[in-house]
Image (tube, rainbow, N blue to C red):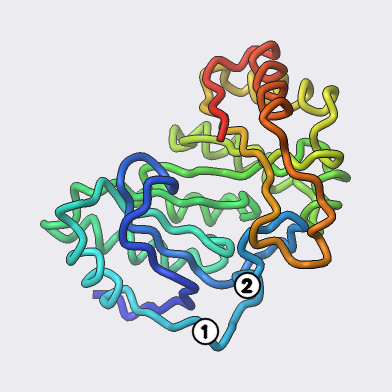
Amino acid sequence: MSSMSARVAEVIPFSWVDGPGNRFTVFLQGCSFDCLACHNPQTIPPRRPDTRDASVAELLEEIRSAEPYLAGLTVSGGEATGQWRFIRDLFGGVRADPRLRRLTTFVDTNGHALPRVWDELLPVTDGFMVDLKALDSDVHRRLTGRGNELVRDSIRHLHGSGRLHEVRLLLVPGVNDAPDQLARTADWLAALDPDLRVVVIGFRRHGVRPEFQVLLESTPELVAFAREVLERGGLRTVVTV
């Protein structure tokens, strides 16, 4: 059994919003982005006094307690890949356990990782859910503090490996919702795979840091418009949240 430990922000034993089916979700502490629209900004610093160190063995025991009611396990964040070795060992432990091996393993990620990280995780991961904050690198930098070159490379790499479950687009009015930007995003994703599952998420201010409460919330009309643009651009599986 691996003795690897990770800094954990929170564990949710049952979640219906972190991948397919009812999932045990682990939120790791620390993120490589500093997103204006982050709903969980407390998970950005690498350490906080209200977080805990948890070993692979400890989490496997917690997962076993919930196993009869689960479809799978998701590791999120913060940014999950900041502690990718822990994910590799945790998912490996799930696959080696007779009780747990039926569970699917997913990673929810901002995509800012090198190919070697994905290649380490691919053998033990069933699916990756990747956030694309903006196709335009300057807009992406405004939103996150970093460019998106690695993110776009990661989406291509994971799709080519057959493990890209979905791409998530957080719609922030006045920042990344321009019709031409949505159209270019549709073109880029449809060229990769017109059947790619794309999830459009309307931005809400809940949980956002006080200095960014001035950001506008997405209206149902804006979310519907974004879906229309994406579908017009050739994407056949667009989901709105």
Q: Residue furthest bottom?
A: 49
Q: Earlier in the sequence, mark 2 or mark 1?
A: 2
Q: Decide: is 167 above or below 31.
A: above
* 17 left or right of 32 in image: left
Q: Decide: is 210 above or below 134.
A: below
- Numbered tag placed on residue 50 in the rendering: 1
Residue 191 appears anywhere in the view: no
Few, some or many C-alpha atoms within 10 Å of disc 2 (few <14, some 14-19, many ≥20)?
many
- Is the N terminus in the top left, top right, bottom left or bottom right quadrant? bottom left
* Secondary element at image label 1: loop
Few, some or many C-alpha atoms within 10 Å of disc 1 (few <14, some 14-19, many ≥20)?
few
In-front residue for pair 144/148 = 144
x, y percent for residue 19: 41, 44
Q: What's the amino acid at mark 1?
A: Asp
Marks counted in the figure total: 2
x, y percent for residue 9: 49, 73
Residue at figure coordinates x 53%, y 62% from the top left: 77
Residue at figure coordinates x 68%, y 44% from the top left: 203
3D distance between C-alphas at marks 2 and 1: 10 Å
Q: Provide the residue designation for mark 2.
A: 42
In-front residue for pair 224/13 = 224
x, y percent for residue 29: 54, 72
- Is the C terminus in the top left, top right, bottom left or bottom right quadrant? top right
Name the quadrant containing residue 94: bottom left
Q: Decide: marks 2, 1 in contact (CB < 8 A)?
A: yes
Q: What's the amino acid at mark 2?
A: Gln
Q: Decide: is 64 above or below 57.
A: above
Residue at figure coordinates x 70%, y 14% from the top left: 233
